[in-house]
Amino acid sequence: MTDQKIYIKAATQISMQQPLSEAWLTAPERPDVPYQRSQDPNFRDWLNPLESRRMGKLMKRALVTAQKVMKEAGISQPEAIITGTGLGCIENTELFLDQLCREGEEMLKPTYFMQSTHNTISSLIAIQCKCHGYNTTYSHKSVSFDSALLDAFVQMRLGDIRTALVTGNDEMTPSYFSILQRTGYIGQAGQVTAGEASVAMMLTVEKDEALCEIEDARLLYHSGGLGDGFLSVPSCSEPIDAVMFGVNGNPENDAFYEQLGQQLAGVPQLRYKHLFGECYTASGLGVYAAAHLLKQGEVPAFMRCDGGSEALKVNRMLFVNHSDGQNVSYIVLKRVE
């Protein structure tokens, strides 16, 4: 691969924070309930009502975040559109299955079925912006977004593409939340809120007005625990100003971060799920948050999870995410001077 530098040109989100806004940097909303759905913008400001009336909420969110990022980046037709999603349009899937159970195989609405597949989201974005290039979807549980970002990163390093729209989209239906709550995965005392994510970011090789640089990105498999695997990421052996973890209050999830935190003793530790919630593509919101924190060059104290009470100056940050403690992503982000 080449040494081509890669930048996040623009990034936005729809979550439990104010949608399409970075107001959380100064005035974050702090959810204190087990389950909360995203705050939606006025879709009429972005989408044709006639075209969007049959779209599910997740598809509308994905389109709006993609449109906003393309507008901010000044790129109307990215060379690649890559999406990560853990559940796809699960609400449409549930509606289709519910109707199937109630009415049998007769008089079913085809729309729910057609929009229930995981790759619907990425395909719809491509249709709307008339992009006929590389288009794919990754569905790998909690590293779905990370896999999509890695795909774009590798292709840009190889010189195959110069721009890529990377998105992460997941919704949390009441029925699915109840299942996760019964298993103890989420919704318990001391755990972060179960939420939803729609995040989009434009990756480019152009440095001008970029939020940050993606210095390195790796997705590793640890069969026997953490070990020293993260040291195989060259950038991790150099000094970093902070590390951002996906701690969510679940001991089974957080044990991995505690172990890694011990190996990175002395490095300030940050979090993001206490503001954005937990879902399969929450890591996309974490990378989004890290990019905007690097852009402003300072991390507010409320983002820290190491007991620190002061804001931090940051120029280089390590973002870590994992799925079941085995599939682990390491993303090194750097402030653009």
Image (cartoon, rainbow, N blue to C red):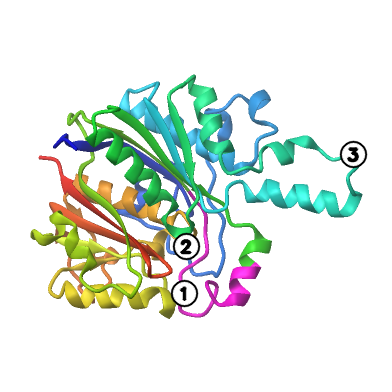
Neighbours of disc 2 within 10 Å: few (<14), some (14-19), many (20+) = many
- The residue singled out by tag 1 in the image is 191
Say which of 168 and 236 sits in front.
236
Q: Amino acid at mark 1?
A: Gln
Chain-order first, disc 3 or disc 2: 3
Instruction: Estimate the x, y position of residue 272 in percent, counting from the top left.
Output: 35, 61
Distance of label 3 from label 1 (alpha carbons): 42 Å
Do tag 3 and tag 2 residues touch (Cβ < 8 Å)?
A: no
Report the amino acid beneath label 2: Glu
Q: Position of residue 332 (x, y in %)?
A: 21, 52
Q: Horizontal and vertical percent for residue 262? A: 20, 78
Residue 200 highlighted magenta (yes or no) = no
Distance from disc 1 to disc 2, alpha carbons, whole Å, reads: 9 Å
Task: Name the disc covering residue 278, or none.
Answer: 2
Quadrant occupied by the N terminus? top left
Q: Answer yes or no: do the residues labelled 1 and 2 have beta carbons within 8 Å? A: yes
Q: Which of the 4 image quarters holds residue 47?
A: top right
How much space separates mark 3 and mark 2, taking CA atoms? 36 Å
Mark 3 or 2: in front is 3
Please name the amino acid that badge 3 sits on: Met
> Residue visible at 35% across and 32% down?
164
